[in-house]
Image (cartoon, rainbow, N blue to C red):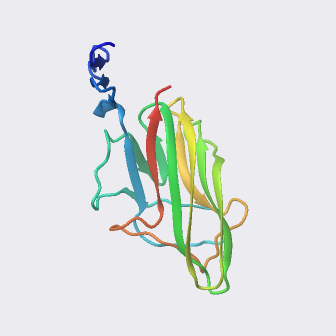
């Protein structure tokens, strides 16, 4: 049985360490997770709409690894290639007559020139009630400079003008979490 040791490169000599008991640990530089939240309530527009006002969580939160994800005008960009897990959800209050709409994560591989729905969740609530839905998916970023991701509602069924997506600058109500699973 070999001794404990490290696997790495010249720039990261302990990228993977193996203890004498066989426990494998990745270095901090290879681990990455970030959470973003909608920072205030957003009213439905009865049209396709992109959610724009996100902030990285800062309440009882510590990012894992470096700031790999950034957001500008609602479009998320990634600094490094890799395979990622996206966990996302929306909390909302339905219009007085009720509401049914689709909630989506869209991906662009041409710097935001065009987007395709990558994951969709359907929402339905009777009049004035509050609810939440969530979903998750795995995706690959093969060209970080051209990759964009955004959260939308209403690709096939618009969110009513009387409905509200809930957001907050102190707690997570609507938002996304990105976890890097591996390199490509």
- Res 29 → quadrant: top left
Q: Which residue: 31% across, 23% down? A: 18
- Res 100 → quadrant: bottom right
Does 91 appear above or below 63? Answer: below
Measured from the top left, where is residue 5 in percent x and y?
27, 18
If the image is split into quadrants, where does the N terminus sit?
top left
Does 146 appear above or below 92? Answer: above
Q: Nearer the viewer, residue 51 or 125?
A: 125
All told, the count of numbered labels is 0
Does 111 appear above or below 167? Answer: above
Measured from the top left, where is residue 39 in percent x and y?
39, 65
Q: Which residue: 61% across, 56% down? A: 104
Measured from the top left, where is residue 129 in percent x and y?
58, 83
Q: Which residue: 48% across, 59% down? A: 52
Q: Nearer the viewer, residue 16 or 109?
A: 16
Measured from the top left, where is residue 13 in percent x and y?
26, 18
Q: Which residue: 51% across, 47% down? A: 86
Q: Nearer the viewer, residue 3 or 170?
A: 3
- Find the residue positioned furthest to the front: 1
């Amino acid at each position: 049985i070999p001794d404990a040791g490290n696997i790495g490169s010249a720039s990261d000599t302990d990228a993977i360490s193996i203890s004498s008991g066989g426990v494998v640990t990745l270095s901090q530089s290879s681990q990455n997770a970030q959470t973003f939240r909608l920072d205030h309530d957003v009213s439905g527009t009865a049209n396709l709409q992109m959610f724009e006002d996100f902030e990285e969580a800062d309440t009882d939160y510590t990012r894992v690894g470096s700031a790999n994800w950034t957001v500008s005008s609602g479009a998320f960009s990634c600094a490094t290639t890799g395979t990622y897990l996206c966990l996302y959800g929306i909390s909302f209050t339905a219009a007085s007559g009720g509401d049914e709409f689709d909630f989506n994560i869209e991906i662009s591989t041409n710097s935001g020139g065009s987007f395709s729905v990558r994951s969709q969740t359907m929402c339905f609530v009777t009049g004035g009630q509050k609810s939440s839905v969530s979903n998750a998916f795995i995706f690959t970023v093969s060209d970080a400079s051209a990759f964009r991701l955004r959260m939308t509602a209403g690709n096939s069924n618009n969110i009513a003008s009387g409905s509200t997506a809930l957001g907050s600058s102190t707690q997570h109500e609507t938002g996304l979490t990105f976890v890097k699973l591996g390199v490509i």
